[in-house]
Image (spheres, grey):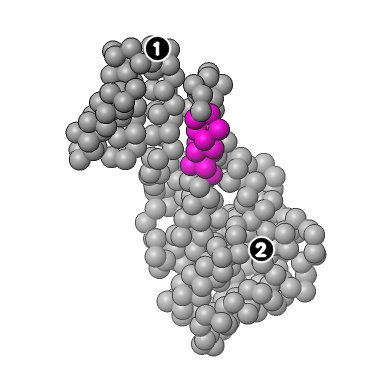
Amino acid sequence: MKRYLLATGIVVTAVAAFISCSTLVETAGTLGTIVGEQQGYITSAQGDSIRKSTTAVAKSLEEFTPEHEYYIGRAVGAVVLSKYKVYANSRLNDYVNVLGQTLAAASDKPDIFGGYHFLVLDSDDINAFATPGGHIFVTRGLIRCCPSEDALATVLAHEIGHVQLRHGMQSIEKARTAQALTILATEGAKNLGSSEVAQLTDTFSGVISDITNSLINNGYSRSFEYQADQASVELVNRLGYNPEGLIDMLQVMGKNIKKGGLDFAKTHPAPSDRIKEIHSKQKLTSVVEPDIRRERFKAAIADI
């Protein structure tokens, strides 16, 4: 066994300088088991099991590409739309899209695969969702909490913040790696059987349901929400919107959300906590809202 480990170590050292981390894991597993089989330390069946498991672990170490994020976002978005109806109001949807695209273009991550997409949901719930890849949904109930275009701009900027900070993808990556490591830890003392190999191979098959459950039922962590609030303030400042609009929206929200409900009350920190956190991080500079901005906002939300 010592000679087997030594041979494996030599192989790993030889290829390490030329291949990525995930490829290294897979290559080491493949070449190492070949040596072990040739020396008679493990059977061919055991070697095959190890090769399959290392391939799965290598998969867990892969980096997501922008294209991966986009298609994951589409899948998550499809689940959101299976739970919420689209608000059939072209004027409001067009208005939200123009506002959202304007904000996205000025964000820290303006160019994403497939671009940003904004859609209003026909629900009285006070909520909004940002999927990986730039699919952003906001409910009628949340728009009603916005007393101005400035306030709505901060809501959309908050969701854009989740996208540019990759909060959804961070959650997925942690879950994927943790699951793979858990299986390896529990099965490390014995040969991996077919069921464990299958688990490793399919480690990330539940990604869509996991992130959707987090997005709709549990929400992001408090730290992620606070980060998105700060990103919102920074983004609206760039475009001359009043960052106090976020405070205005949170104050209205605080009066309307129901404790124990399925909206922001369950998936976000309390509005009062968010307001305290915002004020603790930076001083907001008030901006006078132009008349044209006020008029187009009133026209857009007239029917909600």
Nearer the N terminus, badge 2 or badge 1? Answer: 1
The secondary structure type at the circle numbered 1 is loop
Q: Report the residue that reaches farthest toward the front.
A: 2
Residue 36, magenta (yes or no) = no
Residue hosting label 2? 268
**Residue occupying the point 38% across, 44% down:** 63
Look at the image and give the residue range highlighted in magenta: 175-188
The kind of residue tagged 2 is: His
Using the image as rendered, state which of residue 273 and residue 189 is in the foreground. Answer: 189
Q: Is residue 261 left or right of residue 105?
A: right
Residue 183 lies left or right of residue 11; in this view the side is: right
Pointers 2 and 1 in contact (C-beta within 8 Å): no
In the rendered image, the vertical position of residue 32 relative to residue 122, given as above or below = above
> Looking at the rendering, which quadrant does residue 32 occupy?
top left
Q: Give the number of the mark in front: 2 or 1.
A: 1
| Residue sitting at x 48%, y 70% | 231
Residue 266 location in percent, x, y? 72, 59
Q: Quadrant of the N terminus?
A: top left
Quadrant of residue 267 within the rendered picture: bottom right
Q: Secondary structure at mark 2?
A: loop
